Structure formats: C-alpha cells, structure tokens
C-alpha cells in the first residue's frame, strides 16, 4: 500500500506533466518567432558545452523550467500560509515579475541582492513568461492537490524526472530515506552538541540534499533540546549573526535562542557540494525553507567538483577556496559510481595524477571520494559512505582496499549482499563507516543483510542485529576482503593452510565467444543440414543452461565458426546464410572500425582453446556447476572455461578438479567471498574462481575415481529416465564420500561440517 508521500508525489508528477506541456508549447512558439529567445538558447548551449540536438535541448530546458515553476508555487504557497503574501491573487504577477532570487529578496526585504549567489544557475530556466491565463490554470491545478507540499519532495521528483542515462553519467541515484537515517544515527547523532555546537557535517556529493535535509532535522532537535544549556554555558561568548543583510556581533545570551538555530545550522553546521548545478539549487531551496519564520540567507552549498583541491588554488572564486579550506567532523554521503569508460580522457588523467593512492586504470570515480574525505575530515572525525560492493573483491579496488586498511579504522560495514537498495542501479552496495587510523588491532563490526524486509522497516539495525559479527581489520587481505563470520573464516583458513596452489597456478582460463549477432551464426542441427553448411566451419555449441555439475547436457545447437572463412568463395552455403543478416552484422562496432570482416564473429577467440579437453562453468549461477567438456564444444561469453597447464597435467586431472569444485566444501568456500548478485545468483567471474585454493590430497586417485563414476552415472541419467531414483541415490552417495574425504583432509570438526551442511541446505 502506498504511503502518503508516494500519493503526493504521484499527484505532483501529474502537475509537472501538465506544466511541462504548457511550457513546451511556449518554447516552440518563442523559439520559432522570437530571434532574441532563440539566440539566448544557442548562447547558453554553447557556453555550457551541452552539444545537444535542439529537440533534446528543448526537452531538458522545459523539464527544468517546469521544475523551477513548481518550486516557485511551493514557495509562494508557504509564504501565503505564513501571511508573508496577502493573497493567492498576487501569485501570477510575482511569478512573472520576479526571478527566483529576486522573489526571495522581495518577500524578505533583503537589502543585499541574492542574484549573484544562490540561484544564478537557474535563471536561464525562467526565460519563458507565461500569461496570466496560463498561470491561473496551473495555480488552480496546484491548489486542487489539497496538500501542503514539503520542499523536500522536490529532490525525489527531480530524481524521477532525469533519465537513466543522465543518472549514470552523474553517478546519481536516489538514496532511500531509511538508509540516510541509519547513516546519520551512526555519525551525526553521536555529537555532543554542548561540547561541539559548531559541529561541521559535509556531503561532498550532496545531489538533491537528502543527507543534509535529514542532518538539519537531527541537529535542530539537538539544539532545541539543549538551547537553555547552550545559553548558560556560552552566555558571555561573542558571536556574529546576519539578518536581512545586516551583520552584528552579539553575546551568547542573545545568540543561543531558538529563533537563531536555523541561522546557526545553515551558517556553521551543514555543508554540501555537487557537480550538478540543478541539484545544488534544489538543496539550497530545501534548506532555506526549513524555517521560513527565522529565514536566513546564510548557506554553505556550492556547485563544484569535490575532487578538485580548491584550497590549494589561488586563482578561483573565494567561495570555493573558503569552503574547502575547512575540516569537517562528519563526512557522509553516496559518492557517484562512474567507471572509467564514462570519464573523459583529461579528467581521468587528472584523477590518475591526483588520486593515485586509490585510483588506477579501470577504477571507479567513487574511490577518489574516500581519499578526499580523509584529507578533509578532522582527526577526531568520522566518515560514512555508501560504496559499490565490488570494491571488496574486484581487482580494480585493490588500491582502495590497501588505502583504507592502512589509513583508517573501519568501524562498521553494512553488507547488503546482493540486495539492490537503488532502483535502476545494477550493482550491489554496502555502507562503510570509518575514522582516521588510531588502533593497531581494530575490530570491524559487520552486518550481513539477507532479508529484503529492510525495505519495509525504517529501522535498519533492527533487521540486522541477528546477523552481526566482528572481524579483525588486520585479517583483511589486499587481494580481496572476505567478510565472513569467524566460524566460517576458520574453515576458509583450514582450506588455505592445506594448499599452496590456486586454480590460476595450475590452469589457463578463457572466455567464450561473442558472435555480435547469434542469429547469423548459431543454428540448430536441422538448419545446418537444410542450408548445407560446410562441415569445416561447423562446431558444436552449448549455452550456459547446458552446464550441470560434472557433465554437459546434450545440445542440438551448432556454430558457424566464420573466422575460419578466409575465402568466401570456398564457403558459398555458409556465406549465403550469413548474408541474410549482413545489415545487422555491418553495424557492429568492430566492423565499422574496419577491424573485422562483416561476416566474421565479433570476438572469435582462439579456436585451439575450444578444441582442448577442458572444464566449463557458467558466468552466473545459483550453485557451483563445473563440467568436463571432452568434445570440443564452443560457447558464448556467458560461459568460462579453463584447461590444465602442461606442467601440472601429470599430477592433477580434470576429473579430480571437477570432483572437488562441485563438492559441498567448495560450494561453501566460493560463496564466502564470491560476488552475490541477488535472487540466489552468484557471479562466477574468473578473477574469483581462479583464486580458489586447490586442495591436493595424498590419495587423489580415490577422489578422481569417484568423480569418473559420477560422470558416467550422470551421462546415463541424461540419456534415459530409467532407474532415475537409483542413479540419483548412487550419485549422491559418491558425492557425499568425496565430501567426507575433503573434510577429513583439512581436519574439520563435526560442528564445522554441520555448519557447511546447514549453509548448503539454506
């Protein structure tokens, strides 16, 4: 059932659509008939290097213009309720006569104009003037909502309006409020306001201000509860306060009063920065209106790139220099997740030069925010960021892992473990809270989330308390962070201590083929026959669904391995079939660049690798599914494979490996550190699989023999349903015997074996 906020948001979204349609028509009319307006639009587009086609520019312009008008309506509605405006009848003239910054000045009789400071970035979106008839239609619709719309709702509306591509380019995604609340409860809520009344909270990627909005509320409660004590403690201290453009020095007895709290929080406690100027406009608007009766223009929200060290530059505006010359007590937020592919060349070079401790080729932009935060946090301060979970185990996150381990005391990790808390964002996240390095033997409190009910409860901790454990920070390895319960970790250590070899030491790994257009190259056996495809280019083909534990299920599919076609005239039938898809194939990137012939596979890999005696496994799976391929199958890129290196071929067989990799022990082992994707799926990417330590037992021939028996039984089972129960019983018995051999080899206790069995069952 939708809550009140969602109902209001839906109705405001409908109002936005109506306003957009009106403004869109007005834009068309002005753009075609008003040369001055047309030149203004072109000038703005060039100045800001938007490089957008006019239709796209118009859409973005009208979106933001509609949004600004809704903001004005919300502001005027608040002012009318507070009797700062006499009547709703004044609204049309106020909207058309004053730009946003001028409107603030007019309402609050400010002697110093705001135009150059707070809302300059949005002035362009007030270029269209609607007539009173149009405005009255909009105002009537606004009032028909029958709600006093909270300015804080604007951020959520804006998040809905920007398209997914823009979100990805900015790395900006809406943070659920219960996550914001939790992070603030474990940072800002800890402050002793009597000892630290000038506490400073920074969100360096503030977006629409969710963290700052909630931080304001939290601090407001603290100050109100303690205002009498503050007045008494700092009675004779001197403070500077600004009101209506007038700055004066007052004593603590006059400063620490309820009406000044709004000014104090905005001026001294809340700081935000973001690279998206429209987001910072929303943040400013939301914060300014938190207490309109004690209205204050003092604000520390700026539009800038937080990764530029403005404090070290002297030729920039003083606002940015002053902002970044401070240190902060708490730095919180949700830094943007942007991979290097989406960063321009010059900016990537800047990051490589200035954030080399954490940022390397193929790293994520968000990594740099950790180094920047540690530079700007006070010695006694605390940092809490939402982070992409892949940095725990991915090779691109190694530098960040080392940096955090060596320079911070990690206090708490909330591991959402595959539960997607961000809509339209296909990555798993965690919350990392840490301070500057002080302790040698720091213990990290870890919360593992495996319960989607967190979305139905705003008290995050209440849903996690039963899943809590501690790990030693010194036990975190540079190659990967394994966030396992100490009991589980003990089993992993026994595996590690029992082997000096990892899978990558004894085997070569490779990925499957990318055809670029499967229809052109992957056919059924019947289609191969009907089209008389030449035998020399026909290869057996499997999908990941054909892979089971130990064996491959039969597949009727074949691949035209077109990379073998050097002379098209020698393969007329194959070429005739592929030619049907020429238009599609020519549009593949490599063909456009001239690096592939149009009839070749996009990435055909090395043919010889597929013909080897090898192991195959799916890229994504709910369980370990390793199968021996003795028949030279080819496969797509969602399947990976490996074959044993020549120097190990005499000592370790694929039959031995397939037996241990499909065992309960290795199922448990892999899932302690493998990337969980949600819905039961794990990511079996080679950088994780090939890191598995391989136990080589003394009597490995016994395991190998049992593995061969299982393979034979599985093949019989795949061919016929006869004696199915008997075959399954025999397979289960053999697998259990292999499990017992492995358990005995690494000296697992009965309780540890029970732990593994429970894990597998669940």
Image (cartoon, grey):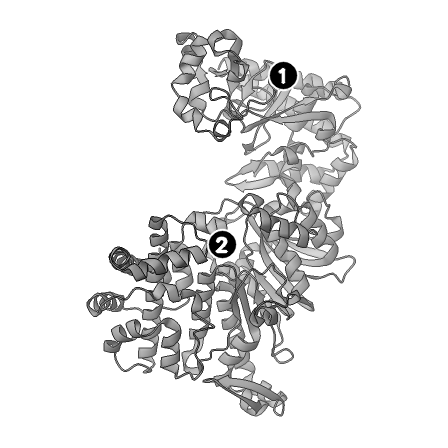
Work out whether 70 lies above or below 686. Answer: below
Estimate how packed mark 2 is, as few (under 14), some (14 to 19) or many (20 or more) residues with alpha carbons within 10 Å: many
Q: Nearer the viewer, residue 36 or 627?
A: 36
Q: Quadrant of the C terminus?
A: top right
Query: Which residue is under mark 1?
Result: 608
> Would residue 357 be found to the left or right of residue 204 on screen?
right
> Would residue 359 be found to the left or right of residue 678 on screen?
right
Q: CA distance from mark 2 to mark 1?
A: 44 Å
Work out whether 342 lies above or below 270. Answer: above
Estimate how packed mark 1 is, as few (under 14), some (14 to 19) or many (20 or more) residues with alpha carbons within 10 Å: few
Residue 147: x and y in percent read 30, 68
User: Which residue occupies 25% across, 73% down?
Assistant: 92
The reply to whether residue 467 is visible in this rendering is no
> Would residue 149 be found to the left or right of residue 368 on screen?
left
Q: Earlier in the sequence, mark 2 or mark 1?
A: 2
Q: Nearer the viewer, residue 313 or 375?
A: 313
Residue 440: x and y in percent read 79, 58
> Would residue 120 be found to the left or right of residue 394 on screen?
left
Q: Nearer the viewer, residue 228 or 171?
A: 171
User: Which residue occupies 61% across, 20% down?
Assistant: 606
Query: Which residue is under mark 2?
Result: 172
Work out whether 341 lies above or below 126. Answer: above
For residue 340, the mark is none
Residue 481: x and y in percent read 68, 46
Q: Dot 2 lies on which element?
A: loop
The reply to whether residue 287 is visible in this rendering is yes
């Amino acid at each position: 059932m939708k809550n009140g906020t969602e109902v209001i948001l839906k109705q405001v979204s409908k109002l936005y659509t109506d306003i957009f349609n009106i403004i869109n028509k007005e834009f068309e009319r002005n753009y075609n008939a008003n040369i001055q307006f047309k030149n203004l639009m072109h000038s703005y587009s060039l100045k800001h290097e938007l490089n957008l086609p006019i239709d796209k520019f118009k859409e973005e312009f009208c979106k933001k213009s509609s949004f600004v008008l809704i903001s004005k309506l919300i502001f005027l509605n608040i002012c009318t309720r507070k009797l700062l405006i006499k009547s709703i009848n004044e609204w049309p003239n106020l909207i058309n006569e004053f730009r946003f910054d001028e409107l603030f000045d007019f309402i609050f009789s400010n002697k110093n104009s705001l135009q150059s400071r707070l809302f300059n970035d949005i002035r362009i979106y007030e270029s269209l003037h609607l007539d009173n008839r149009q405005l009255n239609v909009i105002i009537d619709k606004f009032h028909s909502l029958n709600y006093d719309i909270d300015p804080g709702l604007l951020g959520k509306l804006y998040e809905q309006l920007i398209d997914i591509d823009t979100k990805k380019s900015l790395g900006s995604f809406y943070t659920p409020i219960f996550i914001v609340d939790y992070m603030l409860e474990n940072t800002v809520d800890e402050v002793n306001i009597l000892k630290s009344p000038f506490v400073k909270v920074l969100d360096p990627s503030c977006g629409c201000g969710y963290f700052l909005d909630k931080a304001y509320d939290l601090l407001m409660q603290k100050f109100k509860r303690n205002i009498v004590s503050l007045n008494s403690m700092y009675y004779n201290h001197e403070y500077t306060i600004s009101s209506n453009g007038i700055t004066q020095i007052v004593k603590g007895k006059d400063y620490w009063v309820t009406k000044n709290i709004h000014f104090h929080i905005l001026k001294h406690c809340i700081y935000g920065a973001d690279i998206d100027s429209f987001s910072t406009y929303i943040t400013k608007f939301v914060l300014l209106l938190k207490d309109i009766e004690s209205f204050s223009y003092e604000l520390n929200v700026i539009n800038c790139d937080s990764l530029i060290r403005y404090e070290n530059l002297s030729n920039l505006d003083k606002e940015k220099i002053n902002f970044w010359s401070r240190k902060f007590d708490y730095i919180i937020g949700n830094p943007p997740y942007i991979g290097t592919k989406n960063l321009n060349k010059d900016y990537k070079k800047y990051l490589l030069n200035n954030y080399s401790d954490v940022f390397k080729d193929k790293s994520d932009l968000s990594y740099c925010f950790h180094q920047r935060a540690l530079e700007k946090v006070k010695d006694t301060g605390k940092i809490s960021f939402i982070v992409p979970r892949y940095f725990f185990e991915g090779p691109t996150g190694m530098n960040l892992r080392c940096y955090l381990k060596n320079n911070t005391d990690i206090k708490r990790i909330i591991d959402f473990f595959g539960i997607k808390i961000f809509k339209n964002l296909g990555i798993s996240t965690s919350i990392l809270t840490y301070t500057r390095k002080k302790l040698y033997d720091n213990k990290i409190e870890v919360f593992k989330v495996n319960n989607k009910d967190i979305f139905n409860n705003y008290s995050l901790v209440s849903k996690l308390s039963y899943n809590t454990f501690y790990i030693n920070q010194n036990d975190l390895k540079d190659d990967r962070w394994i966030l396992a319960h100490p009991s589980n970790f003990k089993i992993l250590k026994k595996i590690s201590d029992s082997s000096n070899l990892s899978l990558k030491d004894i085997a070569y790994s490779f990925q499957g083929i990318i055809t670029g257009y499967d229809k052109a190259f992957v056919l059924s056996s019947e289609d191969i026959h009907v089209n008389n495809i030449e035998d020399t280019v026909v290869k057996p083909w499997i999908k990941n669904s054909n892979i089971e534990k130990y064996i491959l299920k039969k597949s009727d599919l074949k691949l035209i391995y077109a990379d073998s076609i050097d002379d098209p005239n020698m393969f007329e039938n194959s070429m005739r079939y592929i030619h049907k898809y020429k238009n599609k194939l020519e549009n593949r990137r490599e063909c456009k660049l001239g690096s592939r012939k149009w009839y070749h596979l996009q990435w055909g890999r090395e043919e010889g690798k597929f013909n080897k005696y090898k192991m195959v496994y799916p890229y994504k799976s709910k369980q370990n599914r390793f199968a021996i391929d003795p028949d030279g199958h080819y496969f797509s890129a969602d399947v990976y494979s490996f074959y044993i290196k020549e120097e190990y071929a005499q000592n370790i067989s694929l039959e031995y490996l397939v037996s241990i990799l499909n065992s309960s022990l290795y199922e448990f082992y892999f899932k302690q550190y493998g990337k969980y994707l949600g819905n039961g799926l794990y990511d079996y990417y080679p950088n994780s699989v090939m890191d598995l330590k391989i136990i080589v037992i003394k009597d490995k021939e016994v395991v190998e023999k049992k593995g061969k028996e299982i393979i034979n039984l599985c093949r019989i089972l795949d061919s016929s349903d006869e004696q199915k129960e008997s075959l399954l019983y025999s397979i289960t018995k053999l697998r259990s015997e292999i499990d017992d051999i492995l358990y005995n080899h690494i000296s697992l206790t009965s309780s540890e074996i029970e732990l593994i069995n429970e894990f597998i069952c669940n």
